[in-house]
Image (cartoon, rainbow, N blue to C red):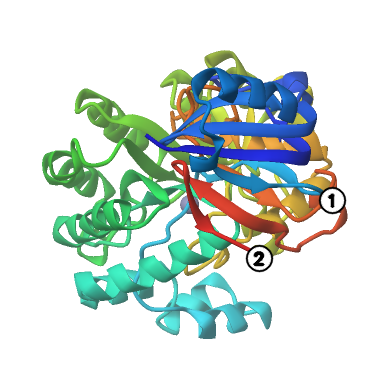
Amino acid sequence: MGFLMIKNAAELVTPIGRSARGGRAMGELRIVQDGAVLCRDDKILAVGTTAEVKNTLAELTTDFSSIEQIDAEGKTVLPGYIDPHTHFIFGGYRQDEFQMRLQGATYMEIMEAGGGIAATNRATHEATEEQLYEAGLLRLNRMLDLGITTVEGKTGYGDDTETEDKMLTVMERLDRDHPVDIVRTYMGAHSVPPAFKGRTGDYVDYLIAEGLPMARGRADFCDVFTEKGVFELEESEKLLLAAREHGFKLKMHADEIAPLGGAGLAANLRATSADHLLKASDEDLLAMRDAGVVATLLPCTAFSLREPYARGRFMIDSGLAVALGTDLNPGSCYTQSIPLMTALATIYMRMTIEETITALTLNAAAAIARADTVGSLEPGKKADIIILDCPDYRHLSYHFAMNLVETVIKSGKIVRKP
Ligand SMILES: [Zn+2]
C-alpha cells in the first residue's frame, strides 16, 4: 500500500460527477485554492485544501516519512486529459499529400496520385505488428508528455479482418505495456475496400459475419464513417444494430462532410457519442441531447482542413454535453496537441476555458463510457492527475498552444517529472 500526496497547489481544478455534464453545467468546476490530493495505490482517496487532506492522512497513518509527496506550490492541478477520438495506429505517413492539399489539390487529385486513406490501408497491411507497435509507442509517449492519460484508439485501416485483427492486437499490447490506458474501438466501416467497390452492402455483410466476431470482447465500441457515398444511413444502422447484438457500445462519425443525418441516427440508437458534427442539423443535435449522446468535437481536423468549426457554442447553449478529441490520424489531422485544441476551442469555437476543461476531462471520459472511473478528481476515481506549470487554470487558454504540463501521475504513479 502506498500513499502519494500532492499539496500546496495554487489551484486544484476539476469538474465533478460520474456522467457527462451538459449545457451550463459544463462551466461549473470545483476550484480549490491551496489544493491537495491524496492517493492510495492507483486511486484517489481525498481531495480538498492542503490542511483538510493532511487531516485525512493523519487519521490513516502517523508515519508521514514513508509518504511520497509532491509540492505543487505555484502550480495548477487538473485531472489527466482524455482523448476520446483517435486513429493512432497506422502504417506509413502522408506528408506529401498534406503539402499537395495545402497547395490546393482536390480529393480526387490526391486519390489519383495514390494518396488518401487507401495509401494508409496499404501501408498498414504491409507493416509488421512490431512496426505498428513501435510507432504506436512513440505516439503514446508524446500523448503522455501532453498530459493525456487515457486515449481511445480505432481500427479501420485494414481492408480485411486480418489487418484489423493486427491493429487490435497492437492496441491490446500497448495498453498492457504503456502507462496510457487505451480504450479500443472496432471501425471496420471506415472506408469501403477496393475489393468491395460499388458493393457497400456486401462489405457491411462481411463486417457483420467476420469483423464483429473477431473484435467482440476485445473492443468496447463499434464505430462507422457515416457519410454520403461511403456508409449511408441504412448501411450504418444495419452494422450498428448487429454490433449492439454482439455487446459493443456505439459511436459514429456523423455529418462531417455533408448533412446526411448521422447525428439523428446516433440519437435513435442511443450511441455513446457522435463525432465531428460540422454539418449536423439543429433538430438532430437536440435529439442527441435528449438521448444523452455526447457530442465529440474535433477542431484540429477542421483547422487542418480549413473547414468551419463545429458549433460548440450552440450545442452547449442548447444543453448538449460536448467533449473534445484530437482525431489524431495520418490523413486529415496528424496531431495529438491538446494545447492547440484548447486554443481553437476557446478562441474560435467560443467555448469558455471552464467548458473546455470539462470537455477534455469528464465529458471526454463519458464519450468513452469511463466517467465512473476517470475524468475528475474525486475520491474513488483512478489517480490520473496532471500538474501544470502555471498558477491559474486560465493560463491554459491565455498562454495558448503551449504545453504547460509538468508532472503526470497515472494510476497513482509519477510517469512524467519536471
Ligand atoms: Zn475519426
Ligand 1 is within 8 Å of the C-beta of the residue at disc 1 = no
Rendered view: 309 above or below 246? below
Are there few (<14), some (14-19), or many (20+) residues within 10 Å of tag 2? some
Q: Residue at the location (84% across, 41% down)? A: 350
Work out whether residue 365 or residue 33 is closer to the camera in this orientation and state it: 33
Q: Residue at the location (60% across, 59% down)? A: 146
Work out whether residue 2 or residue 348 is closer to the camera in this orientation and state it: 2
Work out whether residue 348 or residue 410 is closer to the camera in this orientation and state it: 410
Quarter in which the N terminus is drawn: top left
Q: Amino acid at mark 1?
A: His
Q: Which residue is mark 2?
A: 304
Question: Where is residue 242 drawn, in percent x and y?
Answer: 23, 29
* Left or right position of 51 against 244: right
Helix, strand or loop for disc 1? helix
Question: Where is residue 102 drawn, in percent x and y?
Answer: 67, 78
Q: Of the numbered discs in the image, which one, if any, rests on residue 395? A: 1
* Left or right position of 141 against 417: left
Rendered view: 188 above or below 384? below
Work out whether residue 26 or residue 236 is closer to the camera in this orientation and state it: 26
Q: Amino acid at mark 2?
A: Ser
Question: Where is residue 231 drawn, in percent x and y?
Answer: 38, 45
The answer to whether marks 1 and 2 mark residues whose Cβ atoms lie closer than 8 Å is: no
Rendered view: 196 above or below 117? above
Is residue 60 among the parts visible in the rendering? yes
